[in-house]
Amino acid sequence: MAPRRPSFGSFVTDLSAAIAAWEEQYVSEASYAQYRRASAWVVDQSVKAVTMDMRGATNTQFRDPTPWMVDGWQYRRSLAKGRAAGIVEAEAYVRDDQSTVLKYAMGDQRNVRLPGDVGLAQDRILLPHWRNLLLTQGIRPNASHDLPGSTMARILRNASGQYAERSVPGRWGVFRGEIRVGGSRLMGYIARPPMVRKPVSDAG
């Protein structure tokens, strides 16, 4: 049983010894054809159990995972292939798109970002600061605790100087640059308050 995407990691489980222990007893009561089908059923149920367990783990280990993330765990049965070729082999895997997201939460080793993976195509990934987003942009996380759809595209346009003709009152402007955090300079999107007219006081 092996996930399809090598970058995500793979594992193989051989159930031959466990299945072979039943061969002589099973064949004496039935036939080799029925034994092969029974063996394929055992392997199929095994990869199905792996898939269901991983979907359940995704639901418990992630905060409000989307159905898209949970459905990334899939499996392929061996019955049709096993009858034709005499080979009993099934597969549990993660879909490619979901693998690029899920792999960051799995394993103890350092993960390597590949072309097409989530995040910026640089050596850093920008993370949302929800308090600042609410204060300057009126943005709240959606039900999955992510940025609402097309939000990042709008911020990118604003940072390049493109603003809608009808702007939202109170929304701050945005530009992209480096800021100092804990002694390090980090790339980020910085908001600046809009210009407002102040009433004239006795001091001018």
Image: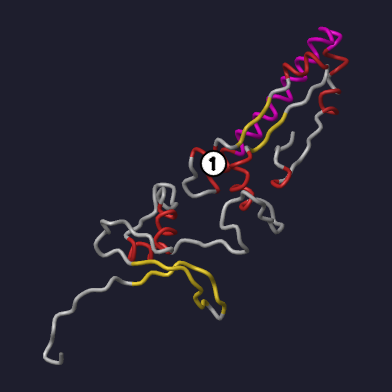
- Vertical arrangement, residue 20 with respect to residue 27, above or below: below
User: Does 19 appear in magenta?
Assistant: no
Q: Which residues are magenta?
A: 27-54
In the orientation shown, which residue stands out farthest toward the left?
202
In the foreground, 97 or 193? 193
In the orientation shown, which residue stands out farthest toward the right?
24
> Which residue: 77% across, 26% down?
89
Q: How is the model colour-coded? A: secondary structure
- Vertical arrangement, residue 145 with respect to residue 84, above or below: below
Determine the main secondary structure of the stretch shown in magenta.
Answer: helix
Which structural element holds mark 1? helix
Residue 105 coordinates in the image, percent (x, y): 61, 52
Q: Amino acid at mark 1?
A: Met
Task: Give the position of the C terminus as an image quadrant.
Answer: bottom left
Q: Which residue is mark 1?
A: 69
> Which residue: 38% across, 69% down?
191
Residue 57 coordinates in the image, percent (x, y): 58, 42
- Which quadrant of the view contains residue 12? top right
Tell me: 13 left or right of 197: right
State how many labels appear. Answer: 1
- Vertical arrangement, residue 93 with respect to residue 25, above or below: below
User: Does 50 appear in magenta?
Assistant: yes
Crowd class of label 1 (few under 14; some 14 to 19; many from 20; radius 10 Å): some
Tell me: 83 left or right of 93: right
Residue 132 coordinates in the image, percent (x, y): 38, 66
Task: Give the position of the N terminus as an image quadrant.
Answer: top right
